[in-house]
Image (cartoon, rainbow, N blue to C red):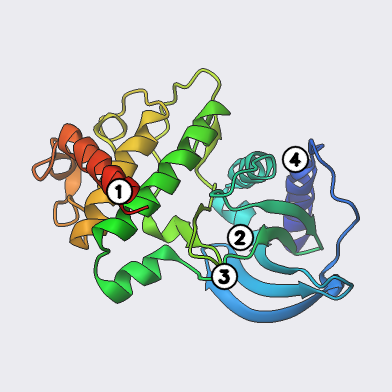
Amino acid sequence: MQWSTVRIVVAAVLQRLKFVPSERPTREWHLTDFDIGRPLGKGKFGRVYMVRTKTEPHYILALKCLYKSEIVESRVEKQIRREIEIQQNLRHPHVLRLYGYFHDEKRIFLMLEFAGKGELYKQLTKYGCFTEKRSSRYIDQMADALSYLHAKHVIHRDIKPENLLLGINGELKIGDFGWSVHAPGNRRKTLCGTLDYLPPEMVEGREHSEKVDYWALGVLTYEFICGNPPFEDLSGHNGTWPPSVLSVCRLTLLAQRLTDVYNVWT
């Protein structure tokens, strides 16, 4: 593809990415408005940096940088637009906030809430597993956030440790809404997410609803306590379903038990 053609395609993508948010930013932002700090992470389409606004009162944010050429090449324009549209309208203490967005010739920038203690995945890797008290606190916070999302007809569809962050006080925050969808009818058929956390209805190509997030919550409950997902060593369609480690009912009961433990301790 010639460069002139690429520029035309990118322009078309930008046009599709333009939409009217329900709550406009208080000002137009540019990259020069920020002091760029250390990198926080790297994804498929770009990087995330800790930044500080140059003007008072010097807000600390996470700036997610996405490269337009990579978005076009991977044909995920709709996915990026949907991520922005959904996340910017969410307001919950356990959902990562998207404050706004802007773009230049080559990149799209998402202004995200800064999660001071980083990825939950790194904590799980460091300690191997969590105590029942700590696990129950995370599950309780995640269940509260999922109830909020589902009440707004939002299905996350990619709940896993890598997409969970910790705030400055250690509170859990759900992030990365790249696979999320707004589904008032609550029925979808797209196969998406991460293999270890896929529910049987997705694997089998059947319609799915917001309950796929609760399946992932059950898998995480097991992983927090045991240190690895229940289906991690299995591969392929037959290995994912039927489950050979724990049934959905046992995972649900374990999640309830952890919540009860947390209530006793607090």
Give the amino acid type for the residue marked by disc 4 in the picture.
Arg
Q: Looking at the rendering, which quadrant does residue 32 occupy?
A: bottom right
Q: Name the residue furthest left.
A: 244
What kind of element bears circle 2? Answer: helix
Q: Residues within 10 Å of mark 1 (few under 14, many from 20)?
A: few
Q: Nearer the viewer, mark 1 or mark 3?
A: 1
Question: What amino acid is found at the position of numbered circle 2 in the picture?
Answer: Glu
The percent coordinates of residue 121 (x first, y second) are 38, 65
Which mark is nearer the camera, 2 or 1? 1
Q: Quadrant of residue 168?
A: bottom right
Q: Nearer the viewer, mark 2 or mark 3?
A: 3
Task: List x then y, in percent, for residue 30.
Answer: 85, 65
Query: Badge 3, how many Cα within 10 Å: few under 14, some, many 20+?
Result: some
- Point 55% across, 53% down: residue: 74
Query: Which amino acid, mark 1?
Result: Val
> How far is the residue under mark 2 from the one under mark 3?
28 Å
- Residue under label 2: 70
Can residue 197 be seen from the camera position used here? no
